[in-house]
Image (cartoon, coloured by chain):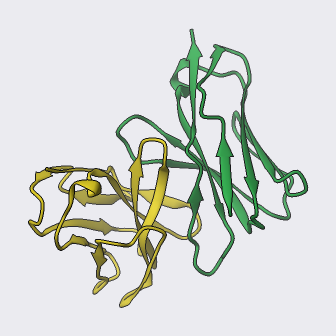
Chain colours: A yellow, B green
């Protein structure tokens, strides 16, 4: 089954404690991206990757890092999380239409 | 600045009627436009894609129109069912190479039985 998986699905952490959200897709897509979704603001792109070792900033990249060492994986790294990064995060992979993961609800206290 | 507008108020309709959702945009020349469905707490699910040179696209009970002169897309669900209740997101891409999508905030549709 074609899918995008994310882990963890829920995470509560404290300010400054580094965390990684994993994302994996089994569709051999070259393009992957990360979004955050906040009430009233919609989905906003954080980072994207057009292929292995090729990543670039989206609309709201501050405070985030990504890496793309393998085609299937695209982890999102928060080196020093802050409360304003509390949000619902989605990973997606695509050809043109985007396939979204189930989401990771992150709370930073 | 670039803007995508979807009606933030929920749309309530009776089962069996046609639901029509609107997506307006300004300061874009999109290469293509997409519609997604999102259920609470879940990831968006792709529904339809329409390109700038297409006027209309259909898939089962769904129809999308794209008017680049009016800078508007309409999304129709015919013979609506309670199971169609969800939030519907419009998304634009202006760069086929980057393939980045900019999303509207979505319109919540509630279909009453």
Relative vertical location of residue B61 with respect to residue B94 in this rendering, above or below: above
User: Most extreme residue toward the right, as rendered?
Assistant: B69
- In the rendered structure, the answer to whether residue A15 lies left or right of residue B53 reads left
Q: Which of B99 and B59 is in front in this view?
A: B99
Pick the quarter of the image with the C terminus of chain B: top right
> In the image, what residue occupies the spot 67% across and 56% down?
B3
Residue B46 lies, in percent from the top left, at 55, 51
Give the quarter of the image for residue A7: bottom left
* Up/down of B100 relative to B48, above or below: below
Residue A18, percent across and down? 12, 69
Quarter where residue B58 is shown: top right
Of all residues, the one furthest to the top in this rendering is B113
Residue drawn where x is 19% and y is 64% of the image: A81
Q: Where is residue A35 in the image (x, y as percent from the top left)?
A: 41, 61
- Please report the residue visible at 65 percent of the width from the left and 41 percent of the height from the top: B6
Between A64 and A4, the one lying in front of the other is A64
How many numbered dots are placed on residues in this image?
A: 0
Residue A103 is left or right of residue A33, and the answer is: left
In this view of the protein, which residue sits in the foreground, B102 or B61? B102
- Residue B77 x, y percent position in the rendering: 69, 31
């Amino acid at each position: 089954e074609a899918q995008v998986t994310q882990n963890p699905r829920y995470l509560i952490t404290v300010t400054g404690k580094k965390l990684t959200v994993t994302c994996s897709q089994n569709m051999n897509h070259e393009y992957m991206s990360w979004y955050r979704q906040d009430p009233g603001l919609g989905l906003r792109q954080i980072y994207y990757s057009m292929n292995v070792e090729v990543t670039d900033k989206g609309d709201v990249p501050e405070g985030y890092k990504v890496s793309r060492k393998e085609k299937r994986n695209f982890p999102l790294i928060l080196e020093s999380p802050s409360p304003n990064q509390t949000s619902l995060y989605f990973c997606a992979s695509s050809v043109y239409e985007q396939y979204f993961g189930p989401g990771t609800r992150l709370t930073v206290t | 600045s670039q803007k995508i507008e979807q009606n933030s108020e929920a749309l309530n309709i009776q089962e069996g009627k046609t639901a029509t959702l609107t997506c307006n945009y300004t300061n874009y020349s999109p290469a293509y436009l997409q519609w997604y469905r999102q259920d609470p707490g879940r990831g968006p699910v792709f529904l339809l894609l329409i390109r700038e040179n297409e006027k209309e696209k259909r898939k089962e009970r769904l129809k999308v129109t794209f008017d680049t002169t009016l800078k508007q897309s309409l999304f129709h669900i015919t013979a609506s069912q309670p199971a169609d209740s969800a939030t519907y997101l419009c998304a634009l891409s202006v760069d086929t190479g980057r393939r980045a999508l900019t999303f509207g905030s979505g319109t919540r549709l509630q279909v009453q039985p």
